[in-house]
């Protein structure tokens, strides 16, 4: 019976990590009402079979460092993303020039902006461009090598184009920022595009739901000091707000 209970618990741990990105060992022990030692054994086993990635003090999904289709990411925490994007709208003045990054949160923001007019929007995201079809905004899409997973353009042509434009406000997504000093992305070429437009924007804003506080990725594309705002939901841990608040302005919704 004990083995069956352990197997069921481990299955649910994997499902939680795939849904929310990462958990601390203490959080999992509280959720399943077992000891930290029991959770530690679960995580060691799941890590050995490749179901998760164990890290110091907790674990993350096995897909943490792998690109996922944008269609899958868009469904995750959608209600929170909508609230975050509604707050982001307050930073967009009429007739301004803005940049929308790749990722599901910026695509959500683009859907809201499709009802506006007079804006000039720069992007390298096909998802963002598609959301803006039929809008009365001027849309410029940076070309380059297509990434079929996150539906974006990247590489030399992309960064070359983005290096020639200046925007008032740039909105960025992030794969996560646990164990980093800034927002991250899964792809080096994507990081280059982000870094280029970051330096060509007056105001830079990172949009992310709170689950990204326990997630991480391969490449950090900026430090928090280089960003002006972080807009997230009120599930962002207090210790994260305290730490990051020393470097950037945090807004929770």
Image (tube, rainbow, N blue to C red):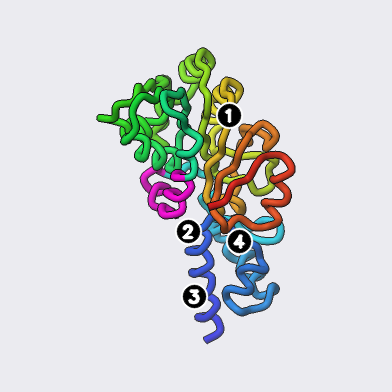
Q: Residue 141, how many percent across, how many down?
A: 39, 22
- Front residue of 240 and 117: 117
Callout 1: SS: strand
Determine the image quadrant of residue 46: bottom right
The residue sitting at the front extreme is 94
User: Was residue 162 drawn as part of the magenta stretch in this picture?
Assistant: no
Q: Foreground residue, 2 or 70?
A: 70
| Precedes in sequence: disc 1 or disc 3 | 3
Residue at (35, 39) in percent of width and height: 111
Secondary structure under tag 2 reads: helix
Q: Secondary structure at mark 4?
A: strand
Q: Which residue is mark 2?
A: 19
- Tags 4 and 1 touching, CB below 8 Å: no
x and y percentages locating residue 184 in the rendered image: 59, 39
**CA neighbours of label 3 inside 10 A, class few (<14), some (14 to 19), many (20+):** few
Residue on which the image places disc 3: 8
Q: Earlier in the sequence, mark 2 or mark 1?
A: 2
Discs 3/2, front: 2
* Picture disc at residue 203: 1
The mark nearer the N terminus, 3 or 2, is: 3
First along the sequence among labels 4 and 1: 4
Q: Is residue 167 visible?
A: yes
Cα separation between marks 2 and 4? 11 Å
**Residue 185: % across, % down:** 56, 38
Q: Which span of residues is magenta-colored? A: 69-86
Is the residue 2 above or below the residue 24 in the image?
A: below
Q: Which mark is residue 23?
A: 4
């Amino acid at each position: 019976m004990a083995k069956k209970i352990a197997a069921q618990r481990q299955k649910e741990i994997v499902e939680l990590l795939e849904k929310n990105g990462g958990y601390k060992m203490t959080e999992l022990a509280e959720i399943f009402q077992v000891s930290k030692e029991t959770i530690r054994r679960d995580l060691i086993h799941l890590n050995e079979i490749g179901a998760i990635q164990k890290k110091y003090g907790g674990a993350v999904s096995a897909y943490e460092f792998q690109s996922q289709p944008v269609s899958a990411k868009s469904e995750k925490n959608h209600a929170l993303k909508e609230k975050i994007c509604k707050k982001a709208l307050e930073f967009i003045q009429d007739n301004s020039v803005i940049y929308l990054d790749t990722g599901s949160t910026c695509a959500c923001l683009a859907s809201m902006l499709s009802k506006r007019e007079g804006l000039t929007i720069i992007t390298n995201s096909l998802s963002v461009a598609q959301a803006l079809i039929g809008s009365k905004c001027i849309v410029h899409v940076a070309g380059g090598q297509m990434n079929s997973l996150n539906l974006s353009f990247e590489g030399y042509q992309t960064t070359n184009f983005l290096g020639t434009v200046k925007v008032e406000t740039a909105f960025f997504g992030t794969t996560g920022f646990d164990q980093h000093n800034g927002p991250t992305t899964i792809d080096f070429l994507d990081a280059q595009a982000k870094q280029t437009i970051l330096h060509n924007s007056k105001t830079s804003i990172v949009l992310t739901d709170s689950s990204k506080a326990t997630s991480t990725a391969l490449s950090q594309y900026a430090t928090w000091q280089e960003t002006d705002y972080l807009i997230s939901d009120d599930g962002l841990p207090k210790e994260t707000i305290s730490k990051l608040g020393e470097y950037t302005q945090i807004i929770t919704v």
